Image (tube, rainbow, N blue to C red):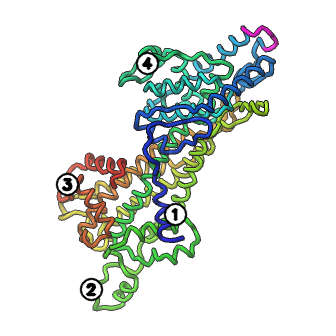
Amino acid sequence: MSDIAMECKIENIQNNSSPKKQIIIGVGQKLTLGDAKLLAHQSVPVSLNSLSFVNMTKSFNFLQRCVDERMPIYGVNTNFGDQVGFLDAHLKNHDQLPSYESISYRQENLIRSMACSAGNIMSPDIIRITMMLRAHCLAQGYSGVNPATVEAILAYLNAGIVPIVRQYGSIGASGDLIPLSSIAACIIGEDVDVLYRGEMMKAPVAMKLAGIEKLRPKLRDGLAMINGTSFMTGIASLAIYNLKRLYKQMLSAIAMSLESMLVISSAYHPLVHQLKNQSGEKTVNQFLLNFWVGSHLLSDLDELRSASINPDSKKTVKPVQDYYSVRSVAQGFGPFHENLEHAVIWIENEMNSVNDNPIVDADNEEIHHGANFMGYYVTDSCDILKMNISQASTWLHALLANMVHPRKNHLLPANLVDHPGINNGFRSLQLLSAALAVQNRKLAQSHQAYTIPTEGDNQDVNSLGTHAAQDLQESVANLERLTAIMFLASAQALEFRGIEKASLKSQAIYKTIREHSPRIHHCRPMSDELMRVTALLEKELI
C-alpha cells in the first residue's frame, strides 16, 4: 500500500459527509454515524420517503388479515415474553370489535408498565437519535406497524419534544424495552415528563402546545415501538462517531510526545512493520512517519551507536533502544485502528437493521418469531473498543510519565517546567491522567460476562448492550481528556527542545494550543484550560 493510501486510511476514520439540510429515513436509505452526529447537535428535520408508506401499509394490512383469521401471533393476540402462553380471550371470538379493543389495550398496558427507567436523565441528543433509529427500523415495512406510528414518532422528533429517559432499565434482550417505553409513553399521551422549549413539562401539555395528537396503538404498534436496539445503538453511534474523530487526534498527540522524547526513528522504519504483516500496524506507522515530516528531533540509531562507544562523544543523551511505550506505538495501536473500522461497520449495520420481533414478511405472507432485538453486535463493538481505550489510556499515562520524570525524559526539566524545585508543572496533570486511566480500565470490563437470566428465564441470555454503550460513551470522554493533557504536555516539551526543530504538523498544532493555553511558567489552576483544549478537539480545530 502506498504512503498516500496509508494516510487516507487514517483520514477516512473521520466523517467526511457533506452538511445536510434534512435526514431522510426509510426503505433504501442508509443512515450513517454522521447522520447521528448531525441530528444530535442540529435541529434538522427527519422525513420519511414515500416507498416506506407503501411497504408499511402492505405489512400492516397483511398482519391485520392474519389477526382477522385468528392466527396466534406473538405480541399481538398473545401476552409478552415468558407469558406468551396467555392467549387473548377473544382469540376464538369472531366479533372483531372486542378483539381489536383487547389488542390495543394490551399494547398500551405494555408501554405503561415498561415506562419505569431509573437513574440519571439521558442527554437529549441520544434521545433524538434513538427516535430517528426507531422510526427508520419500523419504516422498512417488516414490523407490521400502522404508518401512523412512524408518523407520530417523527412528529414528536421534528417538533423538538424530547421524552425524558433515564439511564437504567435495558438488559439488551428484547432490545431496549424500558428506555424505549419511556419514549413510547409520551407518544401515546401518558402523563410523563418531556423537555420542550427548554422546560420540563408533562407530555400532554407539550403535545397540545405543539399541535400533536396522541397515538392509539393498533395490532402490534406498542410492541414495535419498544422491541429493538435503537436506544443502545443511538448511544453507541454517537460515542463511536466521537471516537473516530478522536482517534486521529490521539495519534497526533502521541506523535508530538514521541518527537519531544527524541524517538529513535529506526523503530518506525517501514520494513519493520511490513514484516509484521498487520494492516492496522502499517497504517498507524505510516501516519506517524507522515506526521514527523520536517522534524529535526528524531534520533538516528547509527549516530547513537557511534556515540555510545565513543568516550569523547558529547552527542548521546539516550541509549540505543527506547522504552516500549516510545518504540511500539504502531504495534500497540494497530489493533485499535482495525477494531474501530470494524465497529463502524457493525454499528451502521445496526442503525439500518430491522431489529424487531416478530418479522412480518408481507411479500411471502409469512410471520417469523425471532430475536433481531438482541444487541450483541452493539455489545461486541463497545466492549472491544473499551478494551482498546483502556490500553490507550494506560499508554498515554506512560508517555506522560516519560516526559515528566528526569530518569526517563532525556534532559527535559522535571515536571516539564522551569524551576521544578518550586513549580509542579505537569506533575499534577500526571495524577489526573492516572485517575482517568484507572477509570477507563474499570470501564473496560466485558459486559457479556455479566449476563443475568431474568423475566421468568425467558430472557435467559442477554446482551447488556446498553450498559456497554453507556460505558463506551464515558470511556471516550475520558480518552478525550487524556488526549488534551497529552497535547498540552507535548507542546511544553517541544518548547524546551526548540519548537522550530519540530515537525511542521507539530508546529501547527502547537500554535493552536498556545492561542488557548499559554506556557506554564508558574503553578496555576488548569481545569479551565484543559476544558478549552478539549473543546478544540470537539470542534476538530486540532
Circle 2 residue = 314
Q: Nearer the viewer, residue 515 or 520?
A: 515
How far across and how far down the image is residue 326, in percent? 41, 69
Q: Tag 4 or tag 2, which sits nearer the N-term?
A: 4
Q: Earlier in the sequence, mark 1 or mark 3?
A: 1
Residue 112 vertical position relative to residue 347 in the rendered view, above or below: above
Question: Which quadrant is the C terminus positioned in?
Answer: bottom left
In this rendering, the label closer to the viewer, 1 or 2: 1
User: Considering depth in this image, is 364 or 229 the residue closer to the camera?
Assistant: 364
Mark 2 residue type: Lys
Q: Quadrant of residue 261?
A: bottom left
Depth check, mark 3 against mark 4: the one in front is 4
Quickly name the residue at label 4. 210
The boundaries of the magenta stretch are 91-97
Q: Amino acid at mark 3?
A: Cys
> SS class of the residue under badge 3?
loop
